[in-house]
Image (spheres, rainbow, N blue to C red):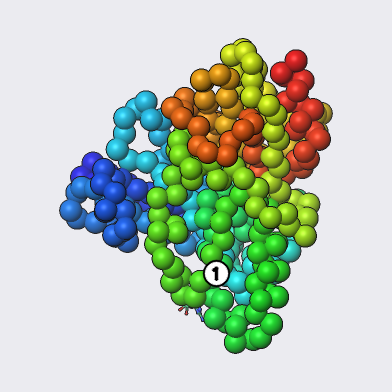
Amino acid sequence: MDDIPDLVTDLTEVSPVLSKSNNKESQTQPEIKKESQGQDRLHFIGNYGIADPAPVAKMFWLDEGLSSNVYIDGVVTVVDSENIIKCLDDVGGHWHTENNHLKTAQSSDKDELTEEEIKDEHQKLQEGITTAHLQIALADSILINKVDKLEKKGDYENKLSQIENRIRSINNTSPMHPTSFGDIDLEKILDLKAFDSEGVKFSQSLNILENSVYHDDRITTITVTCEFFHDLESFRKVESFLQYILWENTVNGKEVEIHRTKGIMVCGSHIKVIQGVRETYDIIDAKQLAPGIDENKFVFIGKNLTHDDLKAELFRFLE
Ligand SMILES: Nc1nc2c(ncn2[C@@H]2O[C@H](COP(=O)(O)OP(=O)(O)OP(=O)(O)O)[C@@H](O)[C@H]2O)c(=O)[nH]1
């Protein structure tokens, strides 16, 4: 990591897992934070108190065409099983304020924050979108931590499934893992390839997990599918659709907020993968189709999204 040590040091306050690897074996031997031997290593970047992983995810999400050997493998979100439900219900931000989880509460000098940051945080709280919503929306893998505490209190299975359902109602594509003290088989959170254009893992991430019995009015996951395209022009139409919904924040005449986009679309032997974080998106050529993909799939995680609206908007562009 000779070329980015300062960056890694500076970013010990953010949460994605960043990897640099030319060597498969090294991926099972991650080093936490900065590491001195320059080659073929994985880096975890830890986060304490940064609300929103999106800016950092975008920073490391480099176009394959740039041939960079640094890339983001995925965002891992750790939730506190004792508090997550309270936290997600924290409309108005009282819990976050009391627990010092807000940028505006953390900063002793308000001048350190831009007016936009203060306004944005205030608006999100009014809308009932909590820090936890954003972190779950952007997660590619979710650790439900401190489950030992749930176990001690009894009714463990029930409480855990309540939490899983609640998380699923927001992000219905990312795997969840119950842990204590973050103890987990690293294979489950490394090599996620969440921003890749190829492979089984990416394709799996397009599959909706079990339907949740809960519905979160604030942020939710919607998948729209359609049959493989018959003309290449449709790819361009989908790009116009993405630009419209991601840049105008509008779907079928309604105001929306899209935090994560991913998808796959096929026309004959041409395969395109879509990746998006907030308003930034990329459409990447893929070489092969992973097994199980037999239709075009577009996944959106965001606010005010419905399947019918997204489908109507997509088909308006495809006409
Ligand atoms: N029982 C138990 N305690 C844990 C676990 N993970 C962390 N802790 C303890 O919980 C305390 C607070 O740690 P964390 O919740 O990880 O810290 P944090 O996220 O910075 O704390 P907050 O910002 O206040 O949520 C520490 O004393 C940890 O040792 C766990 O899985 N089980």
Which residue is found at the position 52% from the left and 26% from the top?
A: 272
| Residue 129 can be seen, yes or no | no
Residue 273 picture location, percent across and down: 53, 30
Would you place residue 111 above or below residue 153 in this image? Answer: above
Number of residues whose C-alpha sits closer than 10 Å to that of mark 1, classed few (under 14), some (14–19) or many (20 or more): some
Q: Mark 1 falls on what kind of element?
A: strand
Task: Identify the residue at horizontal 26%, vertical 53% (top origin).
Answer: 25
Report the amino acid beneath label 1.
Pro
Q: Quadrant of residue 262?
A: top right
The structure residue drawn at horizontal position 69% and vertical position 82%, both measured from the top left corner, is 155
Q: Quadrant of the C terminus?
A: top right
Q: Is residue 178 visible?
A: yes
Q: On the rendered structure, is 206 left or right of 89?
A: left
Residue 223 or residue 108, whichever sits in front: 223
Residue on which the image places disc 1: 178
Vertical placement of 132 versus 288: above or below?
A: below
- The x, y position of residue 113, in whole percent, is 54, 49
Q: Whole-percent x and y of residue 261?
A: 60, 37
Considering depth in this image, is 192 or 239 the residue closer to the camera? 192
Above or below, comparing residue 258 to residue 45 in the picture? above
